[in-house]
Image (cartoon, rainbow, N blue to C red):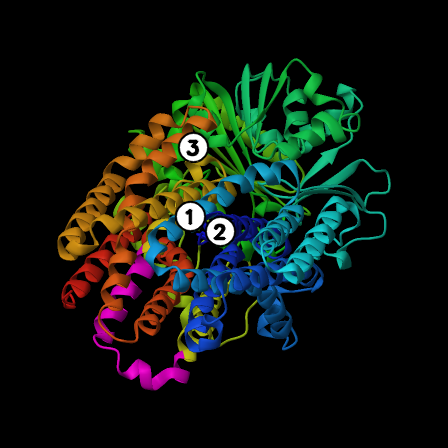
Amino acid sequence: MVTRRNFYLEIFLIGFAALLLEVSYTRFISYKLFYYHTYLVIGLGLLGIGSGAVLVTIFPQLGRITVARMLAAGCWLASLTVALGYFVIALIPLSVLDFWSDPAELPRLFAVCLAMFLPFLMVGLMIAALFGHRSESINALYFADLAGAGAGCAAAVPLMGVVSPPVCILLSSLVFAVTGAHVASIGSPRAFRLNSVTAAVVAIIALLTPVLPDVVPDKLKTMNPEALREGDVLYSEWSPVFRVDVTKSLRPDDAVRVIHHDGIWGSTLQRYEGDPASLKHFDKDERAFPFKVAPSEPEDVIIIGSAGGHEILAALHFEAKSITAVELNPVTVSLLTEEFSDYTGRLNEDPRVHMVVDEGRSFLARARQEYDLIYFVAPDSYATMNAATSAAFVLTESYLYTKEMIVESLAHLKDDGVIAIQFGEDDFETKPNRTLRYLATARSAFAEAGIEDFDKHVMVATTEGLLNVATILLSKNPFTAGQILSFIATAGKVPDSRARHVAGSKPGADAISAVVSLDDEALSDWHSEYAFDVRPVTDDAPFFWHFTPFSSVLAGLGGRLDTASREEGAGERVLLVLLAVAVVFAAVFLLLPFAAVHSIWAKLPHKGRTALYFSMLGLGFMFFEICLIQKLTLFLGYPTRSLTVTLASMLVFTGIGSMLSAAYQGHRNGALAVLLTVTGLVTVAYLFALDDVTASYMGTDILTRIYVTVAIIAPLGLALGGFLPLGLATVASLSDYRSEYIAWAWAVNGFFSVIGSVLTTILSMVFGFTAVLILGLTAYVIAVASLRRIPIASS
């Protein structure tokens, strides 16, 4: 008797490869384009998988293919499209801001999107075929699929730390091919040979990574080939945090080398041969402000975002006794400790310098000491970008600039210590938005800490140059007369510098004076009238660079984008266009195909309530998932780690919840009530306890924080995993067109999941994470109310 194959291992490996590919693409696309395009990757992945289910339903001949044959062919095609897609995505040049003016950009963007879409389409076809032929085992298969996806997520960051994201992309291709060969090994010699040869070729390509074509980044990026000269690139290294490149500068004496973070000029390496006399230029540098106002020869200095070590050299010049240099990316730190150690003077060997690889806020929360100077050095490289590329950071959550971070800093500051932060300001005279927002946030933090007379605790200076820099200094106690005199003297000594606000000075009529000195009511009125949104930012909506309201962007959406402006809504406009693209793509690939079976679709009962149920599940799940990814970024350190840990946890526990749902599918309404109650209780816990829980574990090692994250996600995943099977079981019993109804419900869910992947970020920016979590729960309440009104078919 021949045992029927269950394909649990195969679907596990397919899920593993798919999510390894998706996470690797997020890093890949962050370098090629910008961080916020990772939402496009997530949307295309959801779109491809959903489209596969639709195609199997619309074209019955696909459903008649045996499972083994479909998996063998699908794995081979997935492997092939991943490997070939790498070259398409890597080599096609794109320019984000030219989407508005250059018609040639759209076909190139479509080609890149198609290359990312096709492998996920193959995955969708395989999963749909397997679910259709093994419907009696769908709960176990769905669990194996999600468990594999979760494992792929969990493996992505460690793998990217060992090999590069391009190699991880090829590894996913290899897993597809090996899986296909395994399936075809029984009874399909031709498919076995195809998959085996493909696996061998991909493995060879992966091993020959030095000969792989490098990614061509956006034309706006400083690592675009058009911006480089031959021989400029001295070093390149990927990491899960961001890619690091080092190039020569324009200086003929090679005294400076440029560090690029994800293709954008982010910092510099300064040549230092160990002679303290060579550092005297810092006396006339904007980096003098923090050290001249802080206690002389400070005992303890912490630099958040030490990057290439420029500020470390400044601290050494000003005779700091102990310098803690915190940098998130281990590759950046290795530039000083290994790759360019001799060039930078072996700073890591200086007994006064302590280099730390960590997220700045997390490290500060764990620190047991107080500091004379806490120095934030343009921690996300925005200060060094040209005007157009600022759009990349509008959609980036940054927890280094929030009210809570300033409160944390005050708690680690000595009584006479100073907090310093420096921003690039492209147009300080007309719209010093970064400075205004940080001052407004600091004022709110000081009020929360019970510190009054904010104007006596803050000083602001600007320095013109290649990079126009604004320096903000904060003190726990009012600045002393001596500190004020030092500040004024430094402004006079540093070329092209100007004191914009001196502690305790008479308020002027400028914007800086308004934010610093107006009373609360008058300041609220001023914020309402100011052209940009520079209100304080908090951990609940840490989008520091989001200065242009979406209402203003929508009002001017038809106009030409001003690429010369940093704050004219470029990032917000791109996000709205991504939302529109998601709607169109999802409609074309998920809903439009049902026109081919319109006569069947018209006969399906309760379509309105079914559509409402599955649309709310799609939106609600994405609201929870992406909101938690963003919210836990601070706790876990950086976006890619938060994406992988949070998403892996959601997938695994949603899969377990789906598998467990088989036990209560015969008690639909009671099960819905229990699942909704659990979801509500978990949401309430997130709203009122999540911040306290993460804060209490912030000082622990990363492994403990990952365990805590898994525990945080587990109950939500278990509950959410039961809703989809209950809905599918209901619609399957309503009509003779069982497979068509399931496919349509799956398509509606996929359509709104794709939209939700982008919409979540927009809503988070406008209303904050708390509101989005409430919206997620609301979506499930609406879904349950809708499904309960659909009758349960009699047995």
Which residue is located at x 33 percent, y 57 percent? 136
Between residue 482 and residue 372, name the one nearer to us. 372
Tell whether position 604 is magenta.
yes
Q: Position of residue 224 (x, y in %)?
A: 72, 56
Residue that label 1 marks: 144
Whether label 1 touches label 3, CB < 8 Å: no
Q: Position of residue 378 (x, y in %)?
A: 56, 40
Please state the extent of the stretch shown in magenta in the rendering: 594-620
Say whether disc 2 or disc 3 marks the residue closer to the N-terminus: 2
Tell whether position 120 is magenta.
no
Q: Secondary structure at mark 2?
A: helix
Whether label 1 touches label 2, CB < 8 Å: yes
Q: Is residue 568 visible?
A: no
Q: Is residue 568 above or below residue 256?
A: below
Neighbor class of circle 2 (other Cα within 10 Å; few <14, some 14-19, many 20+) is many
Task: Give the amino acid at mark 3.
Answer: Ile
Direction front: furthest residue: 1
Q: How many marks?
A: 3
Q: Nearer the viewer, mark 1 or mark 3?
A: 1
Which residue is located at x 24 percent, y 42 percent? 682
Residue that label 3 marks: 706
Say whether disc 1 or disc 3 marks the residue closer to the N-terminus: 1
Pick the quarter of the image with the C terminus: bottom left
Say whether disc 1 or disc 2 marks the residue closer to the N-terminus: 2
Q: Nearer the viewer, mark 1 or mark 2?
A: 1
